[in-house]
Amino acid sequence: MKEAETYLEMHGVKPTAVRTLVWDKARQQTETFTLHDMEQWMPHMDRSSIFRALRLFAEHHLLHTIDDGLGQQKYCVCRCEEGHHLNHIHFTCTRCGQTYCLEDYRIPMVELPDGFMMEDVEYVVKGICSKCAK
């Protein structure tokens, strides 16, 4: 637990008991997850407390938030280089609903018209994942 507390403090997040528990569970995940997943993994914790922690982690760039294109908000642990937040492509399987972080595939630069300024970008590709294609 001490490692989680230290990591949160390093990223400007006050490590309360709830935040530390939620972060400890989130950082164990290798794939995307939902608020519902976290509720299942932490059945004795209040839904709103989990949601507030996840939202705070996203604000501090500890998590990416993903609109999977199927109406579900998902999260993945940000594994970006220190001080350099890289936006990567996500792939959502239309059969199983799993969303994958394709960290080796960067979102292509998009030229915008004069007067427009990009603040954030999401890039979700929908299709059939390798597990479902078998």
Image (spheres, grey):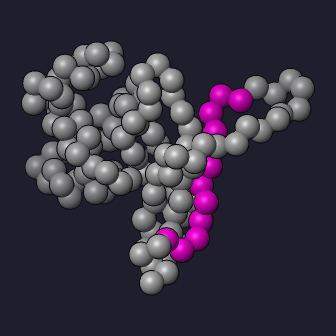
- Return the x and y of residue 48 as percentages of the image width and height: 28, 42
Nearer to me, 58 or 3: 3
Q: Residue furthest bottom?
A: 134
Confirm whether the magenta stretch covers residue 112: no
Location of residue 28 with respect to 6 vertically, above or below: below
Q: Is residue 121 magenta?
A: yes
Please state, as top left, top right, bottom left or bottom right, where the N terminus lies in the image: top left
The answer to whether residue 28 is above or below residue 129 is above
Residue 66: x and y, percent?
50, 48
Q: Quadrant of the C terminus?
A: bottom left
**Count of numbered tags:** 0
Q: Main secondary structure of the magenta part?
A: loop
Q: Residue furthest front?
A: 104
**Whether residue 55 is situated above or below residue 12 in the rendered picture:** below
Q: Is residue 79 visible?
A: yes
Viewed as shown, does residue 122 lie left or right of 80?
right
Residue at the location (23% across, 53% down)? 39
The answer to which image quadrant residue 64 occupies is: top left
Using the image, determine if residue 26 lies above or below residue 124.
above
Q: Position of residue 20 (x, y in %)?
A: 18, 31
Which residue corresponds to the image point at 73% horizontal and 37% vertical from the top-left? 109
In the image, the segment drawn in magenta is 118-129
Residues 85 and 114: in front is 85
Q: Is residue 49 left or right of residue 96?
A: left
The x and y percentages for residue 112 are 83, 34
For residue 26, side relative to residue 101 (left or right): left
| Observer able to see residue 66 | no
Q: Residue at x 58, y 71 (%)?
A: 127
Q: Could you tell me which residue is drawn at 51 percent across and 28 percent down?
A: 85
